[in-house]
């Protein structure tokens, strides 16, 4: 058996304190992001790029201020490419996404996984294309731990006639700690990682994670840039406010569970 | 308490969900019903099929066929077309409701994005199943993804 001396106890406490501080520091930095945020065009082995949303921390504990409140579900949504906000080298683009990507529209397949949450389903458009997914219920994500929520993305084909050297898709993600209505969304109930595009999820600019979304960048890797393009351009695609309001939610069998 | 709320909300309404729109599966069969009200002769389903090397080899061609699963009706048949670049091809299920697919058609367009259309000869509801597969030159199945663009 250990013989616990006063010195040992003191050192142990110091170590625990240091670990605690370290963990808190890491949590504060770890916004929800994709495990692999940069991929190549339609070239991955086995068709899809296997990826995951990494939930870095829970919601804010109102007593301690630590971000260690358990997460009970998460929602992940990709831009639909229909009314999405497109910029080219930072300049708004008024044309369609097809100017840069020829096959966008059914971007994600959830990899079934009940290691953290018991339930999951897709978020689809009116044609049945899978724009995102939600997962929730069950034991959930315990505060202080991280979650890797696996999914695959379909191959993306960049329009060979375009000057796009990369296309970055900006996601909307909500890590839910407490089921509320939209008015009840704050740092203690939900961590929202979404672009600030005027949706009901924008929140205050002072909110933790404001306008700090996860992204998936697809680098051009199949066809060379046309000579006239020079160095090429970087394209960014964000979901519209309308889409986030419509799709960043949990609907189950016709009933909306979150936000209520 | 939040856990229980979520659990209850989900569990109490857990049923098999039936989808009213085009159902796309990973098995590379897609089925749906065109023109439910039987009034739209121009009804067209339009999808993009992306072919890629999933480790089985690069795509040589997209092969597809269509099966009309509705009861036979005079002069009402379902067609399928594949288009890629300068190449296009069409096939028709000649007998509705017999459980057989149309003759297969192929467009040899390599890896990339193929347009796939399904339509019919006149107004009338038609349930159908499309089979679509990206194939290598040695006729092995390779990477196949689909995006539905239109169903009206």
Image: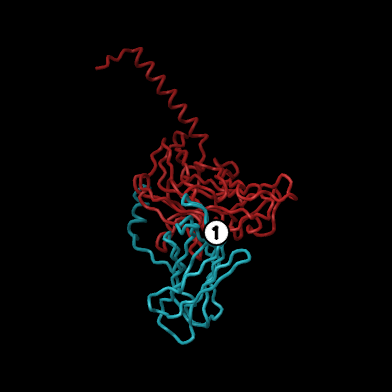
Chain colours: A red, B cyan
State which quadrant residue A69 falls in. Answer: top left
Image quadrant occupied by the N terminus of chain A: top left
The spot of residue A47 in percent (x, y) is 49, 51
Image coordinates of residue A6 in percent, x first then y, are: 33, 13
Q: How many marks?
A: 1
User: Image point 38% across, 20% down: which residue?
Assistant: A13
Residue furthest left in the image:
A1
Can you say which quadrant of the picture contains the C terminus of chain A? Answer: bottom left
Q: Tell which residue pokes out farthest to the bottom in this image.
A: B74
Give the camera-side residue of A44 and A70.
Answer: A44
Q: Viewer-proximal residue, B118 or A222?
A: A222
**Image side of residue B27 versus residue A182, left or right:** left
Compared to residue A35, the image places residue B108 above or below, namely below
Task: Judge the density around disc 1: few (<14), some (14-19), many (≥20) Cα neighbours within 10 Å.
Answer: many
Question: Which residue is more in the foreground, B68 or A93?
Answer: B68
Q: Chain of mark 1?
A: A
Residue A90, above or below B134: above
Q: Residue A237: x, y in percent? A: 61, 52
Tag 1 secondary structure: loop
- Residue at (59% x, 64% y) in the render: B84
Q: Give coordinates of residue B72: x percent, y percent.
A: 42, 83
Residue A86 visible? The answer is yes
Residue most toward the front?
B138
Q: Which residue is mark 1?
A: A105
Look at 38% across and 78% down and name the residue there: B98
Residue A76 in view: no
């Amino acid at each position: 058996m250990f013989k616990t001396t006063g010195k040992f106890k003191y050192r142990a406490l110091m170590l625990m304190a240091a670990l605690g501080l370290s963990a808190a520091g890491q949590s504060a930095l770890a916004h929800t992001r994709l495990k692999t945020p940069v991929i190549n065009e339609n070239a991955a082995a086995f068709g899809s790029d296997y990826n995951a949303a990494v939930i870095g921390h829970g919601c804010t504990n109102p007593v301690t201020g630590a971000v260690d409140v358990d997460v009970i579900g998460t929602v992940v949504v990709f831009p639909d490419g229909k009314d999405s906000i497109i910029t080219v080298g930072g300049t708004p683009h008024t044309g369609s996404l097809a100017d840069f990507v020829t096959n966008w529209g059914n971007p994600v397949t959830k990899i079934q996984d009940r290691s953290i949450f018991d339930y999951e389903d897709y978020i689809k458009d009116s044609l049945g294309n899978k724009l995102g997914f939600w997962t929730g219920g069950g034991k959930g994500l315990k505060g202080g731990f991280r979650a890797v929520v696996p999914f695959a993305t379909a191959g993306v084909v960049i329009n060979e006639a375009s000057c796009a050297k990369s296309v970055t898709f900006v996601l909307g993600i909500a890590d839910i700690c407490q089921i509320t209505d939209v008015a009840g969304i704050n740092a203690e109930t939900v961590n929202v990682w979404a672009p600030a595009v005027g949706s009901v999820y924008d929140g205050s600019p002072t909110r933790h994670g404001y306008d700090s979304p996860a992204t998936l960048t697809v680098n051009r890797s199949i066809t060379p840039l046309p000579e006239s393009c020079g160095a090429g351009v970087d394209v960014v695609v964000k979901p519209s406010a309308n889409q986030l309001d419509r799709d960043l939610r949990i609907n189950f069998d016709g009933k909306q569970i979150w936000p209520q | 308490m939040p856990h229980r709320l979520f659990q209850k909300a989900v569990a109490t309404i857990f049923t098999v969900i039936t989808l009213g729109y085009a159902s796309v599966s990973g098995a590379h069969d897609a089925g749906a019903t065109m023109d439910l009200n039987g009034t739209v002769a121009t009804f067209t389903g339009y999808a993009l099929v992306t072919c890629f090397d999933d480790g089985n080899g690069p795509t040589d061609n997209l092969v597809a066929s269509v099966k009309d699963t509705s009861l036979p009706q005079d002069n009402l048949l379902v067609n399928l077309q594949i288009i890629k670049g300068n190449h296009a091809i069409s096939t028709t299920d000649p007998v509705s409701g017999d459980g057989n697919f149309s003759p297969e058609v192929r467009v040899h367009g390599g890896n990339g994005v193929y347009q796939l259309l399904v339509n019919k000869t006149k107004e009338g509801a038609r349930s159908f199943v499309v089979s679509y597969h990206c194939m290598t030159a040695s006729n092995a199945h390779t990477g196949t993804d689909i995006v539905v663009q239109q169903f009206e």
